[in-house]
Image (cartoon, rainbow, N blue to C red):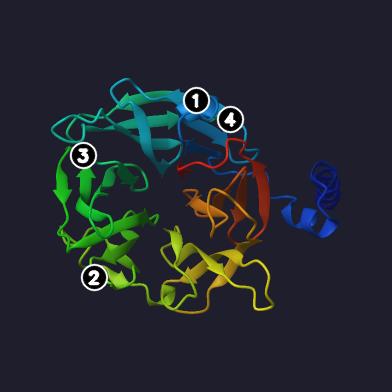
């Protein structure tokens, strides 16, 4: 069968399976076979079926669950997940809250094999993270973890108590110098140095997106440079993720329709060094009891930087970044509170 005939056959099969018109089916055909590591990990609030009691490993080509990983007894439940690429993930587990304060934070290394099964779940040494830490972000390759510990009891807005880097070979924790405020949405480019993050000052200033070099001693937060191209958008940028090459930031905005009617949720690719953003993906907002403003509030990209996943209620949208082609996949549990690919 020639390539042209194969594409036509794929288009017809997609039309029959999804009911999509020819133009949409043609856009998506040919982008389902991924040479990259195809499995991602999602965390769902407890009680929502089998997948609500641990970490679910899923196939980004079909959305199907390929394996489940239960939280160990000392973790109670998983609170965050991050990917280092190549099927390597790190899960954060939160210990039981004690009278003296939050319980110890635990980190587990999860290796997923090429069939989508959990090959191993290994606890890392205790004491890597400060007590109460829930959020870790792995650099590509997994040699270093960044961590963020947040006090959600702050009177005005969540405040970062401690953030820093942990070298997994030595176990050395290197806290960063922090001004008063909140650090969030940290993501690493493929060079293992360039990172993007959101900083929310304690003042009434709006949160801003920064790009930094994490090798800048202990001051990589303070040394961050504002990503000016992310300013001036009509609404707050949520779920920003830096591209693999460090040249763009992918983020979601809610934008009105100038002709009236429901607003749009748009995934934008925003050049870090200036220029016009381009739309990677968009949906008209539909009534959603989970969120009154956004259709999706969780997004992640794969290690090579070719694909993004956006998690709407009941569905996942897999977006091919170079072409903006997308595929809708099922997520019957609703939507995850964390995911990594």
Distance between mark 3 and mark 2 Cα atoms: 28 Å
**Which of the two labelled residues, at mark 3 and mark 1, occupies the earlier sequence position?**
1
**Which of the two labelled residues, at mark 3 and mark 2, occupies the earlier sequence position?**
3
- The residue that disc 4 covers is 65
Mark 4 or 2: the one toward you: 2
Asked which secondary structure carries label 2, the reply is loop
- The residue that disc 2 covers is 203
- The residue that disc 1 covers is 68
**Which of the two labelled residues, at mark 1 and mark 2, occupies the earlier sequence position?**
1
Q: Which mark is residue 192?
A: none
Asked which secondary structure carries label 3, the reply is loop
| Residue at 48%, 62% in the rendered image | 251
Distance between mark 1 and mark 4 Cα atoms: 8 Å
- Pinpoint residue 81: horizontal percent, then vertical percent: 39, 40
The answer to whether the residue labelled 1 contacts the one labelled 4, judged by CB atoms less than 8 Å apart, is: yes
| Residue at 23%, 62% in the rendered image | 181
- Pinpoint residue 192: horizontal percent, then vertical percent: 33, 53
Distance between mark 3 and mark 1 Cα atoms: 25 Å
Distance between mark 4 and mark 2 Cα atoms: 44 Å
Asked which secondary structure carries label 4, the reply is strand
């Amino acid at each position: 069968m020639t390539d042209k005939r194969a594409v036509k056959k794929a288009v017809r099969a997609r039309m029959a399976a999804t009911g999509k018109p020819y133009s949409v089916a043609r856009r998506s055909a040919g982008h389902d076979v991924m040479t990259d590591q195809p499995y991602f990990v999602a965390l769902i609030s407890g009680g929502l079926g089998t997948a609500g009691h641990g970490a679910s490993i899923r196939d980004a080509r079909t959305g199907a669950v390929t394996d489940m990983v239960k939280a160990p007894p000392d973790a109670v439940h998983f609170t965050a997940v991050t990917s280092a690429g190549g099927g390597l993930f790190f899960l954060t587990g939160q210990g039981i809250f004690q009278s003296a304060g939050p319980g110890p934070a635990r980190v587990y290394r999860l290796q997923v094999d090429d069939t989508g099964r959990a090959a191993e779940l290994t606890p890392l040494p205790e004491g890597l993270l400060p007590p109460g830490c829930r959020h870790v972000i792995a650099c590509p390759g997994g040699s270093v973890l960044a961590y963020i510990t947040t006090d959600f009891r702050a009177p005005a807005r969540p405040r970062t108590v401690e953030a820093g880097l942990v070298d997994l070979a030595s176990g050395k924790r290197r806290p960063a110098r922090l001004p008063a405020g909140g650090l969030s949405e940290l993501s690493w480019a493929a060079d293992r140095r360039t990172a993007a993050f959101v900083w929310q000052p304690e003042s009434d200033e709006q949160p801003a997106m920064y790009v930094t070099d994490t090798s800048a001693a202990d001051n990589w937060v303070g040394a961050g440079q504002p990503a000016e191209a992310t300013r001036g958008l009509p609404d707050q940028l949520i779920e920003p993720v830096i591209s693999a090459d460090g040249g763009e930031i992918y983020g979601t905005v809610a934008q009105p329709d100038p002709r009236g009617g429901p607003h749009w949720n748009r995934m934008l690719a925003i050049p870090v060094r200036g220029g016009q953003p381009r739309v990677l993906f968009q949906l008209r907002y539909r009534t959603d009891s989970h969120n009154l403003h956004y259709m999706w509030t969780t997004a992640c990209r794969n290690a090579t930087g070719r694909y993004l996943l956006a998690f709407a209620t009941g569905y996942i949208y897999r977006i091919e970044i170079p072409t903006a082609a997308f595929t809708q996949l099922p997520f019957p549990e609703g939507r995850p509170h964390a995911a990594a690919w």
